[in-house]
Image (cartoon, grey):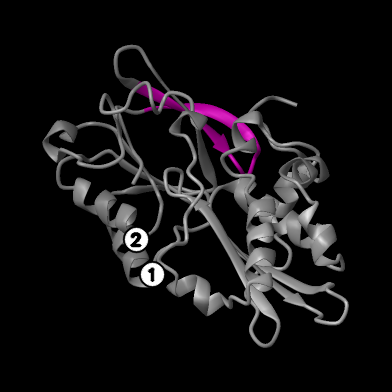
Amino acid sequence: MKSTQYSEKTLDHFRNPRNVGTLEGDNIAMGRVGNPVCGDLMEIYIQINKETDVIEDIKFKTFGCGSAVATSSMITEIAKGKTIDEALEITRKDVADELDGLPPVKMHCSNLAADALHEAIKNYREGKTADDVDSDPDIKYTLCNINNIPGTNEFLNKGVYLKDINKDELRDKRILVLENGEDSAKLALELEDISGRVILMTMGKQPRIQDELKSELKQSHVKILKQSELMEVLGTNSVEKVKIHDLDEDEEYELFVDAVIII
C-alpha cells in the first residue's frame, strides 16, 4: 500500500461511518480532542452501565479528514461492549491495525480516536458531563505538527498561509482554500474579488457550512473541489502545485496553484 493511500476498510468507514451522533441521559460522558492546525476535532460519547462498567453505547462526532472520520467510526466498533478498563487499553495502533493500516502521515495527525475515548472515560470517572466539557476553559487540544502535510512548513508565507493573509499578494493568483468551516468559505468568496481562480476544497461531499452560504457559493465563480484531501505542497522557491487525494476514487493527482490557505 502506498504511503498516502487508504485501505479499503478505511475508505468504507469514511464513506459509511458507524455510530455517528451524540448521547444524552444518565451515565453519559464525552471526550474531546483535536488539532487546530489541521482542523480535526473529535468528540466521543459513551454510556456506561454503572454496575458492570461496560460501555453499552457509544457515538461520535468528528470534524476532519478521511482518516479522522474512519478512526472515530472504528473506535466505536472496537469499544462497544468492553469495560472501561478494557477500553483504556485500546491504542492508536490498535485502531490503525483494525483499519488495515493508515498512511504514515496520518498516524499522529488524525488518528486521535483512542485519545478521545480515553478522555471520555477520564471525564466519566471524574463525574464530568458533556456540558461540563463544553464549559471547561481548561480543555486543551492535541496539537498536530504542520509538518504532517509535507511542504506546508517549507512554504509557509511563501504561498502557504495560515493567518494574517495579505490579499493584495494573492491578486490574480491561483488560490486553493482548504474548507474548515464557514470562515474559510467566506474567505473564498472574498478572494473572488481579486482572483477569478479560487478553489474551495472540502473532504466531504459538501462543504460543512450553512445552507445560505452554500447558496452564495453556488452563485459565485468559486470552484468547489469535493471529497478531496491535501497530501503535499510542492514547488521550488514558492508554491507551484499541490498533490491531492481524491477520496471518492482513491486516486492522487497534482493541481497547479500559487497559494494554499489553511485557516
Q: Quadrant of residue 262?
A: top left
- Considering every residue shown, the one lying at the far front of the view is 126
Residue highlighted by disc 1? 210
Residue shown at 11%/36% (left/top)? 168
**How would you classify the magenta stretch by its main secondary structure?**
strand
- Considering every residue shown, the one lying at the far bottom of the view is 25
Percent across and percent down for residue 16 are 71, 59
- Return the residue nearer the eye: 11 or 251: 11
Report if the CB atoms under discs 2 and 1 are less than 8 Å apart. Answer: yes
Percent across and percent down for residue 138 are 43, 62
Label 1 neighbour load within 10 Å: few <14, some 14-19, many 20+: few
- Return the residue nearer the eye: 73 or 58: 58
Q: Quadrant of residue 167?
A: top left
Q: CA distance from mark 2 to mark 1?
A: 8 Å
Under circle 1, the secondary element is loop
Label whose residue precedes the other's in the sequence (2 or 1): 2
As displayed, is residue 232 above or below residue 202? above
The boundaries of the magenta stretch are 240-256
- Return the residue nearer the eye: 93 or 104: 93
As displayed, is residue 145 above or below residue 23? above
In front: mark 2 or mark 1?
Answer: 2
- Considering every residue shown, the one lying at the far left of the view is 168
The answer to whether residue 14 of the structure is visible from this angle is no
Q: Is residue 221 toward the left or the right of residue 211 in the image?
A: left
Percent across and percent down for residue 249 are 64, 40
Residue shown at 64%/45% (left/top)? 111
Residue highlighted by disc 2? 182
Figure disc tally: 2
